[in-house]
Amino acid sequence: MKVKDVMTRNVIYAEVPGDTKEALELMLKYNVSGLPVVKRKTKKLVGIVTRSDIINKPDESQLALVMRKDVVYAREEDDLKTVAKIFLEKNFRRMPVVKDDELIGIITISDIVWKGLANMNIKEPVEKYMKKNFHSIWEDTPIRVAYKILKFSGEKALLVLDSNGNMVGIMEDADILKSIEIRNEIVKSEVIGGTEGDAWSWDSKNVIYVMKSYLDLPMEPVKKIMTKNIVTVTKRTTISNAARKMAKHKINQMPVIEASGELIGIVRDVDMLKAILK
């Protein structure tokens, strides 16, 4: 299969000059985790920005200073195996598709799994690709703390446990993004003129007011934002069946359970990409 067979052609993008607030609003509106960035009034690709980029620089308003300029891109005729290998090596989830230096689409890990693996009839079980060591969090952990745990662990999702250690939900970084509030604050800056030591001079003071935006995370517990309807697979579920399940529910990872219901791991779409390389 080729990139053109699974790519998204109606791609949402941000523009520069532009600000991070506009980009964040686009991500929230279209429920995406990243955007290609093009030069305003053109389709010329100049960068890419993710929600993590914005969250990690909450006081920077200029999109050009937040986006990544070293963009890896794909072309329509590239093989899916080639793109999957790049995703695994570079550790990112989306890649713009370019023709003659202009943006014509985007391909994501989800595209490859939902539209590619789901139709390849791969019979290997998810057990071979699942993670046995995974991060979890208590349901009453404050969202602000959960964000820090995600950031320090490098994970995209956390399994949520109740006080008895039972799995009651899953929280993704996208859930945190939806809970973020953009807070505006007026900052006063005073500029003093005049020449020190001149007996005939006097101090003049110019006051400048600057509006700055901050990303504010609520202090509510993660159980307020987590996904409670958990979709699971067993360790014997095939890769293609798991991919079809992910596509049906529009999710990127699923807990793996024994026939008894005991939690034994988690399988992510990025882990499943390895199956396409064989």
Image: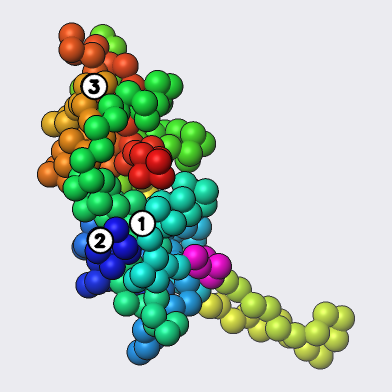
Query: Percent from the top left, x then y, of residue 213?
Result: 41, 63
Residue 138 as seen in the image, left or right of residue 210: left
Specify the amino acid type for callout 3: Arg
Q: Secondary structure at mark 2?
A: helix
Of the residues under marks 1 and 2, which one precedes in the sequence?
Answer: 2
Asked if the residue at tag 2 contacts the one at tag 1, i.e. Cβ–Cβ closer than 8 Å, the answer is yes
The residue lying toward the viewer, choosing from 80 and 248, is 80
For residue 257, say whether it is visible. yes
Q: Circles 3 and 1: CB distance less than 8 Å? A: no
**Residue placed under numbered mark 2 in the picture:** 6
| 222 left or right, relative to 96 | left
20 displayed left or right of 120: right
Residue shown at the point (44%, 56%) measured from the top left: 82
| Local SS, label 3 | loop
Q: Which residue is mark 1?
A: 80
For label 3, the residue is 236
Residue 166 in picture, x, y percent from top left? 24, 14
Write the start and end of the magenta stretch as one range: 65-72
Residue 226 belongs to the span the image colors magenta:
no
